[in-house]
Amino acid sequence: LSVCSINAGSYPAMNVVPTECTVSGTVRTFSVEVQDLIERKMRDIITHTAAMNECEAEFIYRRLLGPVRNDKEITEVAERAACEVAGEGSTQFIDAYMGSEDFAEYLKKVPGTMIRIGVRDAEHNVSVHNSAYDFNDKATPMAVAMLCNLTLKRLEKLA
């Protein structure tokens, strides 16, 4: 649970209690059951706290994306393909990923695996969600070679 924004009142009017406050953020889980529990608990806490203080609360919970759940077999093939190109020990398996990814929706329809290509080095160490992010172009040849190798392995398996 990340609280990412709290908005209430106005700084020049620092002695006036605001009549409204908006809080927003994100909830990320590895399962729908835990997300159900968190939504229910948040609704209870928010509505009961407001009622206890003779206030009103509007609780809006939007489920945009679920957890990324990689297919085990496809992930193993992808890992082998990456190791053949980049060398043994060059991969790291992540069973579930808590990032907010559209790819989670694809995995509900078709088995697959999300692959993250490492792009950090001494000159490129800023996160992708930072305005100073600069993609490391040196990572492109290795990524293309790995994806080509993975494509060939999948085509062989499907043939």
Image (spheres, helix red, strand yellow):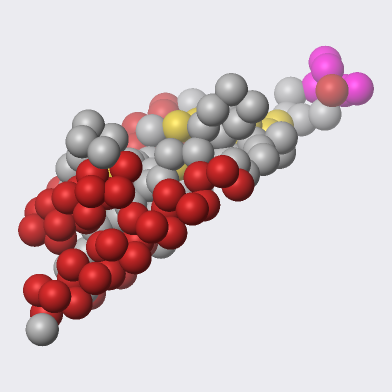
Magenta residues (range): 12-16
The part of the image, by quadrant, that contains residue 108 is bottom left
Q: Residue at x 43, y 39 (%)?
A: 118
Q: Residue at x 24, y 71 (%)?
A: 152
Residue 62 at x, y percent in the picture: 42, 56
Quadrant showing the C terminus: bottom left
Magenta span: chief secondary structure: loop
Query: Seen in the image, is 16 located left or right of residue 105?
Result: right
Query: Seen in the image, is 95 located left or right of residue 143?
Result: left
Q: Is residue 7 above or below residue 159?
A: above
Q: Residue at x 71, y 38 (%)?
A: 131
Quadrant showing the N terminus: top left
Question: Residue 41 magenta-drawn?
Answer: no
Residue 70 at x, y percent in the picture: 20, 54
Q: Residue furthest bottom?
A: 159
Query: Quick one: 6 or 125, which is closer to the camera?
Result: 125
Can residue 144 be seen in the rendering of this structure? yes
Residue 151 at x, y percent in the picture: 27, 69
The part of the image, by quadrant, that contains residue 43 is top left
Query: Quick one: 133 or 152, which is closer to the camera?
Result: 152
Can residue 91 be seen in the rendering of this structure? no
Query: Seen in the image, is 130 located left or right of residue 68?
Result: right
Q: Residue furthest top?
A: 15
Residue 45 at x, y percent in the picture: 35, 32
Question: Residue 13 magenta-drawn?
Answer: yes
Q: Is residue 84 above or below residue 150?
A: above
Q: Residue at x 43, y 59 (%)?
A: 144
Q: Is residue 34 above or below residue 61?
A: above
